Image: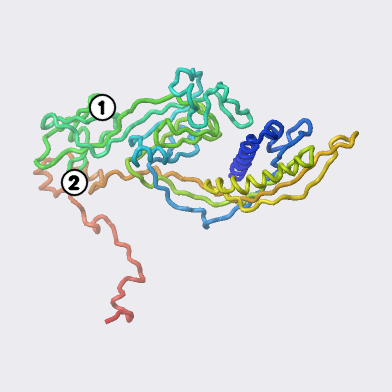
Amino acid sequence: MYAALSENIKRRMIQELRAFWATDPKYKDSLVPNIQGRYSFKERPQQAIILKNSSASPFQLSADHFQGTIVSYCHLTKVSGKNGTSIEWVREDSRQIQKNDGVFPSAPGIYYIEVRQEGVDWNNVPGGSGPNIGDCPPPGSPEDTGPASQGTTSGMCFYVDPLLTVIDERPTLLTPTEYEVSAAKFHQGSLQVFEMPGNLPLFEGINYSADATTGKISLVAPLPSGTTLSVDYYYAGESLGPFPVADNTANNTAIPGVVLAFGRRLYSGDVMAVVVTERREESAREFGGRWEMSLDFDLMARDVYAQGEILDKTLLYIHAQLRDRLSFEGIEITSITSGGEAEEQYDENGDDYFYTASLSMTLETEWSIHLPLSRALTRIIPNTIEQFQAVAGLSDEQIAETGSPTTLLMAENLGLVAIQDPWFRDRSRNYEMIR
């Protein structure tokens, strides 16, 4: 965790300094290429800013790092038989939700994401030749210039196969015993039928039969007067893709309203799933803390006045612009100091020098991980499935003779006992009672 966090902070600071000095006509050609994280030069540059080293110490915000429970429309889950390492995390895309008048733009369901490595003609893929999807350029494009040391994976793409959810739907009545769901067909084995009111489950093969290809439900007998059917099921949506993807990139277009963050463990054949719910639910537990980090920079130039100008402008930029902007992202620059200046001989055979200065920065940044909660409560039924199955095929006369187990049972019969706090129990019998 420390290595990943510090590496990203260092990379971000280098990018920010490069972007700032790229606007300076005097130094953009000579300085910007030499703003780097290591002394990786064959010979001394004329001007450079080098991020020399970094260190960090952790701060615990709670004893077990627990921060709270995340409530969201979406959460990430694994698929049986797959490693599930390609996607690091998923989040809501608040901008898309806001543009959609506060309504989540994707239908509830399970969105299966499969990563593949294949030759894709991105010019024939919608959006492939236009703006990049997320931060990932189409593999092989002029923008795909990331070095192999950064883990760029070329030729990778992913597909999205939705399995959409329908909860508490009233199917269309065709005949007293024939019904039809609105999706015309449903995913085999996902149909659940309930008699309303009461949420009394009906069982296939006992109370009804169903055809997944036509979406029709056939009851063994008509429903009693004053009752209706309610069904839950999944149905397959339209497959989407391919979408280009690379290591350490994000995508927010494949599933509208969801940000998919791909890490550095991307591999072909991996399958993961994103669960989207109709309303915000408890989706994960968040654990986190804070790191205090120190970054040390070396600034060098062949000219003493250029060295002083680079140092002053860098300090002013960090204080006046970068500090406030990073604060909104959770990166707090707490202090920045300038060290001593020095000169070193550039050429041993001549009287030629280069001049250096040091810059130290202390910042704080937070870290967090989400542990998904992949269970959701969709219905509450009054009894156990075993009790309902026991009476599913009985007639009304048989139920009357045996006593219906479909009625609500008393808590004592279920073995449930109310929680009693010993401090507050029987308080009326002690001396503290006010009469």
Going by the numbered disc 2, the residue's amino acid type is Gly
Q: Image quarter for residue 373?
A: top left
Q: Position of residue 381 (x, y in %)?
A: 24, 46
Q: Which residue was labeled with disc 2? A: 198
Q: Quadrant of the N terminus?
A: top right
Q: Residue at x 63, y 52 (%)?
A: 57
Q: Which mark is residue 410?
A: none
Q: Nearer the viewer, mark 1 or mark 2?
A: 1
* Camera-nearest residue between 322 and 298: 322
Secondary element under disc 2, as helix, strand or loop, is: loop
Residue 36 as seen in the image, left or right of residue 366 = right
Disc 2: CA contacts within 10 A as few (<14), some (14-19) or many (>=20) = few
* Camera-nearest residue between 373 and 37: 37
Q: Position of residue 204 (x, y in %)?
A: 22, 33
Going by the numbered disc 1, the residue's amino acid type is Lys
Q: Quadrant of the C terminus?
A: bottom left
Q: CA distance from mark 1 to mark 2?
A: 26 Å
Secondary element under disc 1, as helix, strand or loop, is: loop
Q: Image quarter for residue 217?
A: top left
Q: Which residue was labeled with disc 1? A: 185
Instruction: State yes or no: discs 1 and 2 in contact (Cβ < 8 Å).
Output: no
